[in-house]
Image: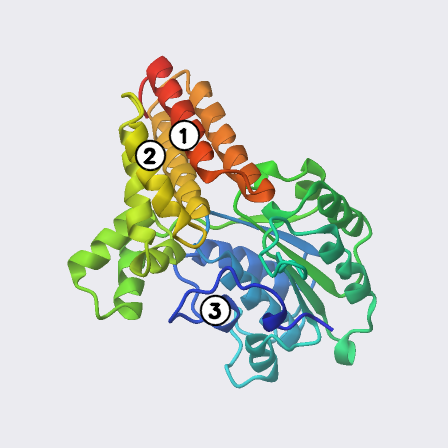
């Protein structure tokens, strides 16, 4: 039987907001939804989808929408073209509760010895797919598995997933979520049909924030939308806790990269991060997102010689991932990353 939500850590849950499996609204992703809808309702959908896009733009929401439709109507045109399923439908109720026997969700779990969130999606978790897809489907229906996210897999887990993709079972669908599909094995990418979710435009994001955060002023919501860079999830996280401060710190580190590193200020920031749950990971995410967007904008404007900045971005991602996996000193990671960003700025100019 699929794991119930209480058995894994819901890293995508935001206080005060419905979890993606309970969410029926998919904002600003009509193009991606139309592609998936045509495939599902044709009766011959691919057996694996690679759902790509930045964090917080609706990948999990789309995956659960697909799952509800398949579990309610199968791969047929019996349901609506927008893949919606009534809230009172048994499939919707069971998916929302995390109790549908035809749905398996694979996420990083808590270490049974320490209780802390594991740094990777382990091979043991991925191997559960074989047993799940080998079960007889309920009432001749479909079985759906969500991998959230494939970016968290270690090498052994990636190879286990690839083996399953090479021999896909019938009447089963695998929904693979990824924030950075370029890092996945090419053979995994080639065996999935890819659908890309884009950052939300400012109008869609502002309208949804007005619905979800009516207590905030229009100016506060506009600030959140700007910092979130098209990610509804990021905007909602910024609205509470220390997210806004960390996003501003990330922007400041990038904007000041041309000058010498302010070591005392970095030590103060490192001490702040140590007191914030997942503070270093959150700052790393904002830094990576901010750099990636600036590099992309410069490339679209025709600026040459961005290889050093691309290399700095890759190093940044590796540094933060290694720090989390090996429990290294966050202060040293922060200093190293800032020095690498500063070096790239001095040699090739700011982004």
The percent position of residue 56, horizontal first and vertical second, equals 43, 55
Residue positioned most to the top: 347
Q: Is residue 201 visible?
A: no
Residue for point 53% across, 77% down: 85
Q: Earlier in the sequence, mark 2 or mark 1?
A: 2
The percent position of residue 62, horizontal first and vertical second, equals 52, 61
Mark 2 or mark 3: which is in front?
A: 2
Tell me how far mark 3 sits from mark 1, CA to CA. 35 Å
Q: Secondary structure at mark 2?
A: helix
* Res 10 label: none
Q: Secondary structure at mark 1?
A: helix
Q: Which residue is mark 3?
A: 19
Q: Is residue 210 visible?
A: yes
Q: Secondary structure at mark 3?
A: loop
Can you say which quadrant of the picture contains the N terminus?
bottom right
Q: Earlier in the sequence, mark 3 or mark 1?
A: 3
CB-based contact (under 8 Å), mark 2 and mark 1: yes
Can you say which quadrant of the picture contains the C terminus?
top left
The percent position of residue 248, horizontal first and vertical second, equals 28, 43
Mark 3 or mark 1: which is in front?
A: 1
* Res 266 label: 2
Tell me how far mark 2 sits from mark 3, CA to CA. 35 Å
């Amino acid at each position: 039987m699929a794991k119930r939500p209480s058995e894994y850590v819901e890293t995508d849950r935001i206080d005060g907001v419905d979890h993606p499996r309970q969410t029926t609204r998919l904002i600003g992703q009509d193009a991606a939804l139309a592609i998936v809808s045509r495939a599902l309702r044709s009766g011959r959908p691919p057996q694996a989808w690679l759902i790509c896009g930045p964090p917080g733009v609706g990948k999990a929401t789309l995956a659960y929408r697909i799952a509800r439709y398949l579990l309610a109507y199968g791969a047929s045109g019996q349901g609506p073209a927008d893949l919606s399923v009534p809230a009172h439908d048994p499939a919707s109720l069971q998916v929302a509760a995390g109790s549908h026997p035809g749905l398996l969700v694979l996420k990083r779990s808590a270490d049974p010895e320490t209780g802390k969130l594991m740094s990777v999606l382990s091979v043991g978790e991925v191997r559960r797919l074989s047993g799940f897809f080998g079960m007889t489907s309920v009432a001749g229906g479909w079985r759906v598995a969500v991998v959230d996210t494939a970016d968290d897999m270690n090498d052994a887990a990636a190879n286990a997933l690839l083996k399953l993709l090479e021999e896909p079972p019938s009447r089963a669908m695998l929904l693979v979520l990824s924030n950075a599909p370029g890092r996945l094995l090419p053979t995994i990418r080639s065996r999935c049909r890819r659908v890309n979710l884009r950052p939300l435009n400012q109008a869609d994001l502002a309208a949804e924030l007005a619905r979800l955060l009516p207590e905030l002023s229009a100016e506060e919501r506009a600030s959140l939308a700007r910092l979130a860079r098209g990610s509804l999830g990021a905007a909602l996280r910024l609205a509470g806790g220390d997210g806004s401060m960390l996003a501003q710190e990330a922007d400041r580190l990038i904007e000041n990269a041309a000058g010498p590193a302010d070591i005392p200020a970095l030590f103060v920031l490192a001490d702040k991060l140590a007191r914030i749950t997942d503070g270093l990971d959150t700052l790393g995410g904002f830094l990576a997102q901010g750099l990636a967007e600036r590099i992309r904008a410069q490339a679209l404007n025709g600026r040459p010689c961005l290889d050093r900045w691309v290399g700095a971005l890759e190093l940044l991602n590796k540094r933060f991932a290694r720090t989390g996996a090996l429990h290294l000193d966050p202060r040293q990671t922060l200093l190293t990353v800032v020095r690498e960003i500063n070096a790239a700025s001095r040699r090739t100019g700011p982004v």
